[in-house]
Image: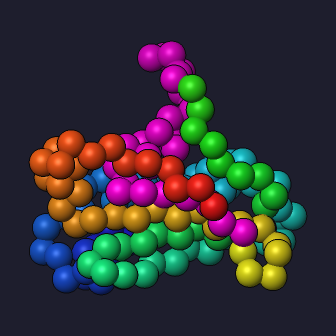
Amino acid sequence: MQELPQRLLGEARPLPGEPQRLGELFANAVRHGDAPPDRLIEIRFAVTTGRLRLEVHDAGTGRPALQPSTAPDDEHGRGLFLVNELSERWGCCPRAGGIGKFVWALITPAAAFTDLTLDRTPKLVPA
């Protein structure tokens, strides 16, 4: 699974934080989703303008939100913080047909280098 996004982008080197972003988005859909049990969670990958777009689709009604800082010993509450810090951008949109939503993260292959060089902070993009 980790190698698929790299192959899509034609990258020989690992994408910084890629498994964590996908894992956190998927875990949020499973843990916080209020969809009926017969509904599936779908993962999509797309490459646009040299960036990898990860999407996790679910039939739930809730929308993700960054939480205030968690205490160092808290075991939960850091998922979207990690997605925010490791992605160029991320957001949440309604699904076509009006059932559920999808949460996406945009990944630049050299994001770690670019963010440090340009002093850029990843931001949530409102839907």
Residue at horizontal 81 percent and vertical 58 percent from the top: 61
Above or below, comparing residue 97 to residue 27 in the picture: below
**Count of marks placed on residues:** 0
- Image-based side of 82 in relation to 57, left or right: left
The answer to whether residue 112 of the structure is visible from this angle is no
Above or below, comparing residue 94 to residue 44 in the picture: above
* Image location of residue 35, percent across then percent down: 82, 61
Per the rendered image, the range of residues in magenta is 69-94
Pick out the residue farthest to the right.
36
* Image location of residue 2, percent across then percent down: 32, 68
- Image-based side of 105 in relation to 14, left or right: right
92 in magenta: yes
* Image location of residue 103, percent across then percent down: 59, 62
Which quadrant is the N terminus positioned in? bottom left
112 in magenta: no
Above or below, comparing residue 80 to residue 16 in the picture: above
Residue at horizontal 44 percent and vertical 48 percent from the top: 123
Which quadrant is the C terminus positioned in? bottom right
Q: Quadrant of residue 101?
A: bottom right
The answer to whether residue 54 of the structure is visible from this angle is yes
- Image-based side of 19 in relation to 103, left or right: left
> What coloring was used for the rendering?
rainbow
Residue at horizontal 27 percent and vertical 78 percent from the top: 50
Residue at horizontal 52 percent and vertical 44 percent from the top: 80
* Image location of residue 60, percent across then percent down: 78, 61
